[in-house]
């Protein structure tokens, strides 16, 4: 199966110089570095200033803010690099396309990821190893450590999860992945690895899930369908 013909993506800007290509790689990692920094420096000040809980500061303000920033960056960078307005950006990212075949593929791909992870049985060992690295370990206050989603309102949790899957998929798949095509036919593998590395703010949980990241990048490479990637991303998050 190959990506259907798509003039929107074919006309997109591609980095030609070493500097431009390095910048594209950096754009994959920058949001994760920002989230890592903000969680460690702004959590307590926001909690005190806004009179909210630690979970609300981390999920409702910092993480949701970073996700929305990625969504805004999609439009800003598409304007800057591709010369596209809002509608053109949505077309570029596949927002208006819907591929039933891709959506149907998302479920068996998810099941295959779960089955492969179970058979290989590497996730717990890798998670334990990452936790031994001080700057990658999840601190006691981290929203993943304190089950933060159980400590916020269902409405805020739903909005945070929606912002997460929609903005990440628009940014990483819809906008950035095709700009790695200079790497050749295996560019989707690099895209999946970069998406994994981006999650430095929750490395012990996200890094062992590299198969899921590769599955998302592979599904986009095969079909170029944003909504199937959003579905697969949601299923992967639910299984964590």
Image: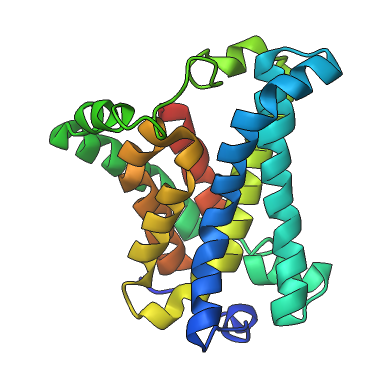
The answer to whether residue 200 is above or below residue 6 is above
Which sits in the foreground, 6 or 39?
A: 39
Which sits in the foreground, 46 or 178?
A: 46
Image x and y of residue 111, in percent: 31, 38
**Residue 15 makes an appearance in the image:** yes
Image x and y of residue 36, in percent: 56, 38
Number of callouts in the render? 0
**Residue 108 makes an appearance in the image:** no
Which sits in the foreground, 162 or 203?
A: 203
- Quarter assignment of residue 62: top right
- Residue at coordinates 35% horizontally, 40% vertically from top-left? 207
User: On the rendered structure, is 26 left or right of 193?
Assistant: right
- Residue at coordinates 77% horizontally, 74% vertically from top-left? 79
- Residue at coordinates 56% horizontally, 21% vertically from top-left? 143
- Quarter assignment of residue 155: top right
The answer to whether residue 98 is above or below residue 81 is above
């Amino acid at each position: 199966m190959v990506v259907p013909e798509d003039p929107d993506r074919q006309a997109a800007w591609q980095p030609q110089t070493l500097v431009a290509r390095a910048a594209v790689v950096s754009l994959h990692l920058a949001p994760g570095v920002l989230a890592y920094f903000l969680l460690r420096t702004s959590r307590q000040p926001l909690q005190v200033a806004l009179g909210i809980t630690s979970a609300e500061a981390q999920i409702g303000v910092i993480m949701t803010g970073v996700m929305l920033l990625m969504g805004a960056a999609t439009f800003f960078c598409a304007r800057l690099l591709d010369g596209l307005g809002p509608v053109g950006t949505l077309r570029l990212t596949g927002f208006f396309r819907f591929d039933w075949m891709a959506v149907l593929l998302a479920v068996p791909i998810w099941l295959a990821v779960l089955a492969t992870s179970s058979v290989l049985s590497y996730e717990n060992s890798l998670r334990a190893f990452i936790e031994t690295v001080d700057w990658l370990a999840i601190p006691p206050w981290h929203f993943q450590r304190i089950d933060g989603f159980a400590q916020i309102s269902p409405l805020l949790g739903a909005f945070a999860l929606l912002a997460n899957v929609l903005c990440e998929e628009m940014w990483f798949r819809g906008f950035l992945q095709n700009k790695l095509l200079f790497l050749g036919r295996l560019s989707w593998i690099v895209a999946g690895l970069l998406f994994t590395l981006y999650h430095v703010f929750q490395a012990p949980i996200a890094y062992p899930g590299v198969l899921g990241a590769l599955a998302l990048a592979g599904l986009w490479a095969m079909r170029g369908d944003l909504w199937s990637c959003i579905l697969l991303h949601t299923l992967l998050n639910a299984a964590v």
